[in-house]
Image (cartoon, helix red, strand yellow):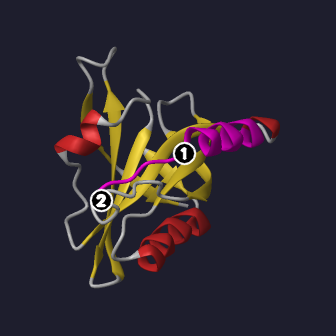
């Protein structure tokens, strides 16, 4: 289960609307709970560095990711997931999303943005023990 604050949920959905018709992307900071759930306290916007196909691909600059991770740790937060949008496509992971996901145990949140308006938001946990066996599992979102 992914527990997300109302403000973090609103941030990622608004980000998708603002970057439409391109994909937005960002990092989810918070904590891993003893019961296996994750709690998101902040959604941090990132720039999409994909120049070849930003309308259906995204990339977070590694330097930006390291900075966000460092600043989060200073506040006692971990990276618990990532988010991006699917402009005019369903909030369902694609084969490319799976191929480019590498943070096992983290959540990957996708918001479909239809004609510039955020619609459905879904979450998928990247499960497995290594790159070859990784898979996405549907994950419930609870807005706190």
Image spot of residue 102 (x, y percent): 39, 29
For mark 2, what is the residue?
Answer: 53
Circle on res. 50: none
| Above or below 18: residue 138 | above
Label whose residue precedes the other's in the sequence (1 or 2): 2
| Above or below 73: residue 16 | below
**Magenta region, mostly helix, strand or loop?**
helix
In this view, the residue in front, 83 or 51, is 51
Taking the magenta stretch, the answer to whether it contains residue 139 is no
Image spot of residue 90 (x, y percent): 20, 64
State which region is magenta: 57-72
Image spot of residue 23 (x, y percent): 37, 64
Find numbered disc 2 in the image and state the secondary structure of the residue it sits on: loop
**Rounded to the nearest whole Å, what is the CA distance between mark 1 and mark 2?**
15 Å
Quarter of the figure with residue 128: top left
Q: Is residue 135 visible?
A: yes
Quarter of the figure with residue 72: top right
Find numbered disc 1 in the image and state the secondary structure of the residue it sits on: loop
Task: State how many labels appear.
Answer: 2
Quarter of the figure with residue 11: bottom right
Disc 1 to disc 2: CB gap under 8 Å? no
For mark 1, what is the residue?
Answer: 61
| Above or below 100: residue 144 | below
From the viewer's perspective, tell me whether residue 23 is left or right of residue 15. Answer: left
Residue drawn at 74 percent across, 36 percent down: 70
């Amino acid at each position: 289960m992914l527990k997300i604050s109302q403000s973090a949920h609103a941030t990622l959905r608004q980000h998708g609307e603002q970057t439409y018709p391109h994909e937005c992307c960002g990092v989810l900071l918070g904590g891993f709970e003893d019961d296996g759930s994750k709690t998101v306290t902040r959604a941090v916007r990132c720039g999409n560095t994909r120049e070849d196909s930003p309308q259906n691909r995204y990339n977070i600059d590694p330097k930006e990711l390291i900075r966000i991770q460092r600043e989060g740790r200073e506040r006692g937060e971990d990276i618990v997931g990532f988010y991006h949008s699917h402009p005019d496509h369903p909030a369902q992971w694609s084969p490319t999303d799976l191929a480019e996901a590498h943070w096992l145990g983290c959540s990957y949140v996708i918001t479909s943005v239809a004609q510039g308006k955020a619609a459905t938001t879904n979450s998928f946990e990247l499960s497995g023990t290594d790159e070859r066996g990784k898979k996405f599992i549907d994950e419930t979102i609870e807005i706190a």
